[in-house]
Image (spheres, rainbow, N blue to C red):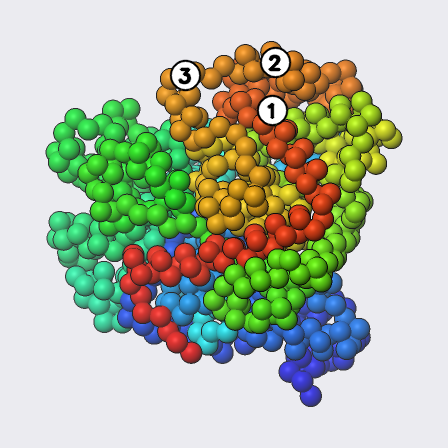
Amino acid sequence: MTKLEQYTLDLFNKPIRECTDQELYKVLLDLVRDSSQDLPTHEDKRKLYYFSAEFLIGKLLSNNLLNLGIYDEVNNELIANGKNIMDIEQAEFEPSLGNGGLGRLAACFVDSITTLGLNGDGVGLNYHFGLFKQVFKENQQHAIKDPWITGDDWLIKSSKTYDVPFKDFTLTSTLYDIDVLGYNQDKRNRLRLFDLDSVNAEIIEDGTIDFDKTNILENLTLFLYPDDSDHEGELLRIYQQYFMVSNGAQLIIDEAIEKGSNLHDLADYAVIQINDTHPAFVIPEMIRLLTARGIDFDEAVEIVQSMTAFTNHTILAEALEKWPIHALEDVMPQIVAIIRQLDARKKAEFPGNTAVEIIDVHGNVHMANIAIHYGFSVNGVAALHSDILKAETLKDFYEIYPEKFSNKTNGITFRRWIMDANKELADYLDNLIGTEWRNNENLESLLDFQNDIEVIEKLRAIKFNNKLRLKKRLQDTMGVEINEHSIIDVQIKRMHEYKRQQMNAMYVIYKYFDIKAGNIPTTPITILFGGKAANAYTIARDIIHLILTLSELIANDPEVSPHLQVVMVENYNVAHAQYLIPAADISEQISLASKEASGTGNMKFMLNGALTLGTMDGANVEIHGLVGDENIYTFGQSSEYVINLYNTGGYNSNAFYQRDTIKPIIDFIVSDEMLALGDSTRLNRLYNDIISKDWFMALLDLEDYIETKEKMLADYEDHTAWTQKTIVNIAKAGFFSSDRTINQYNEEIWHLIPHKN
């Protein structure tokens, strides 16, 4: 009897063939969890603690089976019994622990940390409903709660609890673990997620994400990034951040003492990586805990500084996180006292240099400034981003601490983004170039087949099969039917003006006019969007409304709809991404140059054989360097040009709006046709913002964007040449493995000893 048969009988007392998909999900969950628990955790003295506000880990069933090395065996047994693992996976809820690129990066990183045999855990919060579940009604985004904690999930309740002291009360945490498995690794790491037993989902009003923000005992871990546009929301965010870092810091001290640390040598036992600014309070909290255990303040500062590293994900100086000191005093006065001491030291050391103050003249506490002054390492996440940090955003810090700054270009885990998401392509690569690429991410030998017609045809067939998978996915989840014979153009990312989904929507209007004028595209085009707008981010929600209204307008137009389709994927998440990315022909990476730190979607599309349509921003610059001019489609003004426009106030959106090529497109947003379907307030607000402000300069690059996209569509018609370009992209994608990134972090920052099986 096989292990799977035994588990099925033990749980449901019937054979595999007679089980429902829901029952088989429970069987596989138990089987994988037991197999994971059989793997030991690391015993090494030195350990990494990767602090992040979010971990967008995605569904784990297939990924864990893959990493355990039993995916094919289990899948074949299911097929033999008339079952399909993809159907079974539909019973799994995606953990609502993250939202955007920051959380997905953290998820890829913990996967790579474990795969490389490094001793490192993720530290965060156990959110019950994540950001929110996105639903579309009347062409608008609505937010409802997104539950995932069902009992049939990956959480394992630990016996560890910690007391976290706030100003007016103390809260006792509960620690939950999710096992993190490495690819063919015989040890596991964990996500350590802190929660409160008193959190109560019932306080949320039905059909909304509204709740009493003052009831910390019941609301603390309900949502990721609760709306902080009012004072109560601001305090809730601070409560969350301090709860995370206090628990994490106490865990670090506990584990170090268990291994023999006297705390004076804590930096030999632990290294902390702060993923963006949200966990920066771990620095003063760790100082507080060490001094409470009898260590002198000066020594505590030295210890913490020698064990803490900071990854910056922001370019805009004004977007760097800061909190009013009076709000911090309302939540954690004991930490404010330490922050004041840390600030006084740096003000004395750098008198008059207001750019590097921790507490500014307005009484705001700057999170990045804490992390840079009192950490030993600061890194950006793409070459261009790191250069901009040194030259612009953090220029004053770079002049003081040049030795702290480095670049660590982001990466993605190939386990999820090709082996799991695109199994047909992964298996074909095995047959073509051998299986070594699965371990070393070296795909360069694929270039030997660039002119092989049989390979080109096979890759086209794989792409078509992935379009069929996507078609079924969208039918099943949204009731939308797409044309699998169309060009699939995809922009999936958090909704934000700097990512310029509005510019893509302007292209849709241009194409609508073009088709109306009788210029029928040779191949139909399907333009897919996906992403959530923060509930309080009005303009981003207006952009969603524009896209959904255009989608309805085009769908109802028999002249245009056979040739152009626009779909906004509802509640975009990792599970959707695993269908969208393998099916894509065009990867939209169109942020305003100088605004995107890195991006990782660009890497996932590249690995799966989509061609990039992008500005020279973030990691697009490095993709361009790897594949060359002829295998990427770039457009738009340079980052230097854009930065100069901001510095001089030299951009005037209205001047661009007045151009004959642009004005009809923008005016269409508030045309009779659009207002008949859309909300007048939203469309007019967006229209006025574009013509009078356009802060992220969509109109600056619009004409070049349209021209470049049209060239792409024309080039697609030479299927052989197009596929040859995709071969170059896949072959050069190895650089963007998160294993490469993590190796670099470890060699230059963490100095952990890799475990070998």
Residue 580 placed where, x, y %? 66, 49
For marks 3 and 2, the one nearer the N-term is 3
In which quadrant will I find the C terminus?
bottom left
Residue 206 placed where, x, y %? 66, 40
Q: Amino acid at mark 2?
A: Arg
Q: Specify whether residue 361 is in view.
A: yes
Residue 370 placed where, x, y %? 27, 41
- Residue under label 1: 703
* Residue that appears at 25% across and 47% down: 404
CB atoms of marks 3 and 2 within 8 Å? no
- Camera-nearest residue between 756 and 737: 737
**Regarding mark 3 in the picture, which secondary structure is present there?**
loop
Question: Any mark on residue 677, and which?
Answer: none
Where is 462 relative to 722, above or below? below
What distance separates the C-alpha of mark 3 from that of mark 1?
Answer: 21 Å
* Residue that appears at 28% across and 45% down: 405
